[in-house]
Image: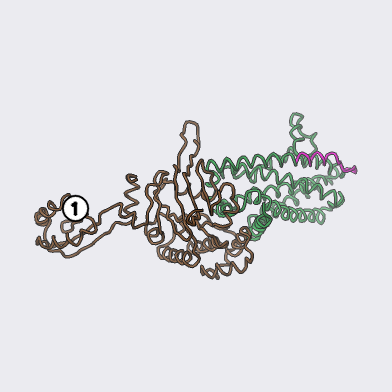
Chain colours: A green, B brown
Amino acid sequence: MKLHRIKASATHSLYHLNHSMETWVDLFWFSFTDILLFGLISTFFAKTTGDAQFLLAGIIIWEVLRVGQYTISVGMLWEVWSKSFSSLFISPLTLSEFIIGQAIAGLVKSAGVTIMVCLVAGVLFGFNVLDLGIFNFIIYFLVVFTFAIAAGIFILSLIIRFGTNIQSLAWGFIFILQPFSAIFFPVETLPEFLRPFSYLSPVTYIMQSIRSQLSGGEVLWPNIAISFTLTIFYLVIVTLYTSRVLKHSKSSGSFARMGS
Amino acid sequence: MTNQNILEVENLVKVYPAQKRGENEYTAVDGISFTIKKGEILGLLGPNGAGKSTTIQMLTGLTTPTAGVIRYFGMDFAGNRSEVLERINFASAYSHLQGKMTVKQNLRIYGMLYNVKNIAAKIDEVAKLLEIEKLLDRTFWKLSSGQQTRAILAKSLMNDPELLLMDEPTASLDPDIVQKVIELIRELQQKKGIAILYTSHNMEEITRLCDRVVFLYKGKVLAEDTPLGLTKLVGDSKLQLTFTNDRGEVEKLLAPLFKERGSIQYQFINERTITISLPEADVPGMLFDIKNTGVWITDIGINKPSLEDVFLKFARKGELK
């Protein structure tokens, strides 16, 4: 693994962002409209049923998850659509270097989107994310972002395995996690038989800690530890799976076909 | 590495597994071997399904061989992927640069990937060589096909490769642009001494460019020779004569001559034109003899066998070797 190639992959992603209106819309515009919508909903709930700042906290965490995974999985698709996939992988660049570079670029993009949505939440709806504690928020951000990378790698490996027929998963897959990650409501809201699934998502534990803080309680460090452990577990699993998929796709010829 | 072989391919095999239950596995490349020496241009020729693309994919690491050895610069490719790929490069009409980025940004990225020391200077050098200075700040997608080809070639020179793999680099280009690109490739090879593996469907390109040609058919090497050597495998030239006499008279006058020379193949294209197949060395004598029969010739055409004839013969019959 070479640093200069990881740097090339990260720079590639940022250069691309600079020229891609579609990516700006996917990342910043959707995040902006989401925070605006949920800000208005939380304002309405605040007037009728009480404080609903957890909705704003939820959407901020959700955007970290969405943008992180998008960068990895759609980043690869841009190369397929542009027919530049072969050129990239015929260079000394390895898939792991590509992914790490994209993840670094994803961190920059996620940080940018998060700052934007936090500013909108603060200025328009009076929700100051720093009330959670800047250190705590950075921990929440990093754990969720790392899980987003694991989710992105998983989707990317599915695309390598099954081809671009399933490319819509690059946008759509992450939404299956939304109801099971206690983002906008506590786990107890789910039907009982679905609750165990919720505890498989690292985001659930982060949101429980945030919700605890917003209710005047403490940071739930054991929850953060569980979330972190689960995230690392998923990262290891998807890395192993991707490695296997890559080997299979190079053997079956599907990796080469992605570039043609 | 023997005799400065830059690339050695030994008994390379690729068997694709069955895609669905009930289907058979498919052998795309079946034990091919060839070498490329320093500074040599080797053509890889063959009809669709011959195994050219699969061979290129294995040579670039996009596809894993089922069996066989690929050795670059004396190193096993499988165990030295990065070291090898840093010293070779690839250009194809089908492998683009990132369309949304400018040409310069693309070249900068590849400069970083290949760990080029002074990327800005290298971009200037390749841009000047390929006359794309004015295109550097333009988005790749907005370039014409010919401009894109030159940008792709520029990318392929960013690391000063010792071997350039070129997979139909001129596909979908207008003939005048093809000519320019061919001249450019020849010039590059002469100036920089790069070895080139060149695949194309265009026989003229192969004839003009390649020192040696490997002809693939159904995954096997059917023939390997210089373009001229390969054309000799096809054999006869075609002598086309137009005359003032009518067909019946010509047949009558030439019949004894053809009988005397044995089994000469001939065919009337129309009432006043005949095509005679015969070895190239026999053409002058045949013309002299025909003149003496009293046939009044008004036009003479001699078509020597081309690589296209070789291609057609091999592709249709797969009969040699």
State yes or no: residue A220 in magenta: yes
Task: Specify whether B4 is left or right of B308.
Answer: right
Return the x and y of residue A94 as percentages of the image width and height: 62, 50
Instruction: Identify the subunit bearing mark 1.
Output: B
Viewer can see residue B204: yes
Q: Which residue is mark 1?
A: B266
Return the x and y of residue A47 as percentages of the image width and height: 84, 46
Give B176 or B296, whichever is nearer the viewer.
B296
Give B203 or A173, whichever is nearer the viewer.
B203
- Residue B159 higher or lower than A221, as above or below: below
Q: Quadrant of residue B113?
A: bottom right
Q: Quadrant of residue B281?
A: bottom left
| Magenta span | A215-231
Task: Specify whether B167 is left or right of A222.
Answer: left
State yes or no: residue B101 in magenta: no
Give B306 or A151, whichever is nearer the viewer.
B306
Return the x and y of residue B129 as percentages of the image width and height: 52, 69
Q: Quadrant of residue B278?
A: bottom left
Give neighbour class at mark 1: few <14, some 14-19, many 20+ (Cα, 10 Å): some
Could you tell me what secondary structure mostly forms the magenta stretch?
A: helix
Give the residue drawn at x 46%, y 52%. B35
Give A126 or B79, whichever is nearer the viewer.
B79
